Amino acid sequence: SDFFQNQLNANKTGSTVAGIKAAILKGLFLPVPPIEEQQRIAASCKNMFNMIEIVKNEQEDISKLISITKSKILDLAIRGKLVPQDPNDEPASVLLDRIQSEKEELIKAGKIKRDKKESVIFKGEDNSYYEKIGDKIRCIDAEIPFDLPELWTFARLKHIGGIVGGGTPKTNIGKYWDGNIPWLTPADLSGYDSMYISTGSRTITDFGLKSSSAQMLPANSILYSSRAPIGYTAIATNPVCTNQGFKSVVPYDFSISPYLYYSLKARTDNIIQRATGTTFKEISGSEMAETIIPNPPLNEQSKIVEKVTQLQEVISLIEKSLN
């Protein structure tokens, strides 16, 4: 009771660790109700604790259901089952051709290196999926997660965007820190629900950027944590850099960034399965680049992003009301 607790607080001793002496404890007054009332109190407390446990279990069940629902929405989205298909849409293969042309321009400008294993994934007449690299063609059905609608196509992540890591300037050198460059760690995305992010808790200077392996990521890059944990995701609203806990994606065509954001979220379980490490799992840049992404027509990408965002917002409102 509050009466007994107040006595404990008034008689405790010690500065580092508070305690109460046995002799003092024996002398404290304790209110004792009649035995019949004690039994009623005990029964009432038992009922209340049972109700609390039921509510707690129900909240946990609802939380699990909400998590499953969010995952299912993303799964349906990247399978082409969330919004209706439009046969008049420009095929995704045309979009990938444009992305390839933009990639060629970056190669000619010396901004990126040519990939010696440039590939195209296609569906054969036998309904199996194949990957063509140079003159070689191999069946990749074992890597294909599901079948796609008519106008969609699969592509390796490395063919639609560059994979960029990060770094940390030395923390004991003051001139590297508190500059005007946003610098993010996976902790900045912990519990972060928004699609876009502009900065983290810390910033670095130009000196700090040049002294480390951190790299500037342009606006509309997709930040993706590669360890501890894998899968925190957000789109940069402005140029940012990250620590080494990211394998971020810089799309060759930024119009696909919002869809790619959701697609990477949906493919995170697959990415985790391909991660390695004993102390903690981490996805390497080369393995991240091999992630197979389902690509819808650009027009459908916009519809998917709009629908997923709408549904996720409704679910988030429900989630907040439960808390």
Image (tube, rainbow, N blue to C red):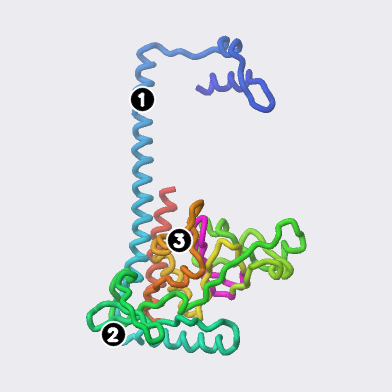
Give the quarter of the image for residue 37: top left
State yes or no: residue 223 in magenta: yes
Q: Earlier in the sequence, mark 3 or mark 2?
A: 2
* Amino acid at dot 3: Ala
* Tag of residue 44: 1
Please indicate, yes or no, whether residue 112 appears anywhere in the rendered image: yes
Q: Secondary structure at mark 3?
A: loop
Decide which of 138, 314 is in the foreground and name it: 138
In the image, residue 178 lies at what x, y percent? 72, 62
In the image, residue 122 lies at what x, y percent? 33, 82
Instruction: Check disc 3: other Cα within 10 Å, few if <14, some if 14-19, many if 20+.
Output: some
Q: Residue at x 41, y 49 (%)?
A: 322
State yes or no: residue 189 in magenta: no
Q: Residue at x 71, y 66 (%)?
A: 208
Would you name the residue on which mark 3 appears?
275
Would you name the residue on which mark 2 appears?
87
Q: Earlier in the sequence, mark 2 or mark 1?
A: 1
Q: Secondary structure at mark 2?
A: loop
